Each structure stands twice: as structure tokens, then as C-alpha cells.
Amino acid sequence: MFLYLLSILSLCVQVVFVTLAIAAGLYYLAELVEEYSVMAKYVISWIVVVTAVIHLGLIIFEDIPLQLNSLGLFQQFLHALLLRDFPVFRLTSVTFVSSVLNLILHHYLAFKFFGTTYYGFSEVLAYFTLCLWIVPFALFVSLSANDYVLPTTGERQHLLGENNVVTDYLSQKAKRYSLLSFFSFAKDSILPQRNKKSF
């Protein structure tokens, strides 16, 4: 009985460590994307291409329904359209909304198919990881890169206020929320800070 209680306590500790490791990894990835947004676009573009090739391989070599793989290929097409304006994401654009709705439908049909047809857990996890989650996850992490993009002449929003362009732009950007700003706030409020001593 005592060992059983210890196993429950151990499981709780492991969950805390895994959660902290995931949060630290997300924070690091968000900083990398922010710092190297051109490279991030290049990497995500290749991930989209590889995912599309995986769907074509599933059409050729596996008995997964054609509609499921067609949805996956259409999803990668929508992701490629989203990457045209990277790192800027317009959450109200037709492409973004279509991508989210298609992702939900793709999840529903994938759960329905794998619920009725037996595949091993590792095969199902491989499908969901590589065909459904990897590109949306990469796009989610890169949302914070938009916060530090300089304004261009092609922007539709009017940047001139009472202040000059740069001041007005930076004050607008400071009010936005992103994954990186959330992690920075959590780091500053949760973790203890070291005070530098001046001698």
C-alpha cells in the first residue's frame, strides 16, 4: 500500500517535470523563431512539403481512406498559403479560418477512422504527430514572431497617431499578447529573481 502511494506521488512529480520541460522548450523555440524568422519560415515550409509527401505515401502504400489524405493535402495547401505572409498571421482571414475548420474536420475523421480500424498505438501516434500536429504546432509557436516585425508601407492599418510612426507602432505592439510574452510573464512572476549586489 505504501509503495502504491509512493507511485502516485512519483507520477505527480513526473507530470510537473514534463510540464516544465515542455514549457521551457516552447519558450526556447519561441525565442528562436523570433530571432530567426526567415529561417523559421524556411523550416516550416519544408515541414509542409514533407507532410504533403507523407500523405502521398499513405495514399500509395496504406489503406487509409482517400478522403482523409485528401483533407491532409488540402490542409498543407492552406498552410502554404498562410506562410506567404509569414510571420504575419491575420486571424480573421479566410485562409486562417479555413485552415482551422479543416484541421478540426481532419481530426474528427481521423478519430473516427482509427476508432473503427485497428492500428497499433505507435502507428496512430505517428499519423497524428506527423500528419496533423507538427505544422499547426510550428505555426502556433511562431505566432510571437509577429510582435517584433517592423511596419511596412503595405500594411493596411493606419500607423500614424498623435505620435510619430515608430512610437505609435511600438505602443500598439506592446499591447499584444503572444506565447513568448506569456512565458516571459510566467518566468518573471513564478521563478525567483536574483538581485545583483552592488559593492
Image (cartoon, rainbow, N blue to C red):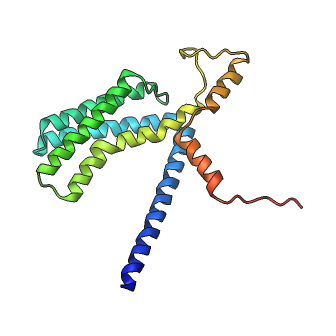
Q: Position of residue 58 (x, y in %)?
A: 17, 43
Numbered-mark total? 0
Q: Quadrant of residue 92?
A: top left
Residue 53 visible, this angle:
no
Q: Quadrant of the C terminus?
A: bottom right
Q: Quadrant of the N terminus?
A: bottom left
199 in relation to 128, above or below = below
Query: Residue at (13%, 36%) from the top-left corner?
Result: 66
Q: Position of residue 24 (x, y in %)?
A: 52, 55
Is 164 situated left or right of 1 in this image?
A: right
Q: Nearer the viewer, residue 187 or 45?
A: 187
Query: Residue at (58%, 42%) from the top-left corner?
Result: 181
- Which residue is at the far front? 1
Q: Position of residue 77 (x, y in %)?
A: 30, 28
Q: Nearer the viewer, residue 33 or 160?
A: 160
Q: Position of residue 172 (x, y in %)?
A: 63, 26
Query: Residue at (63%, 17%) from the top-left corner?
Result: 159
- Which residue is at the far right? 199
54 in relation to 167, above or below = below
Is 122 situated left or right of 20 in this image?
A: left
Query: Residue at (53%, 15%) from the top-left corner?
Result: 156
Residue 20 visible, this angle:
yes
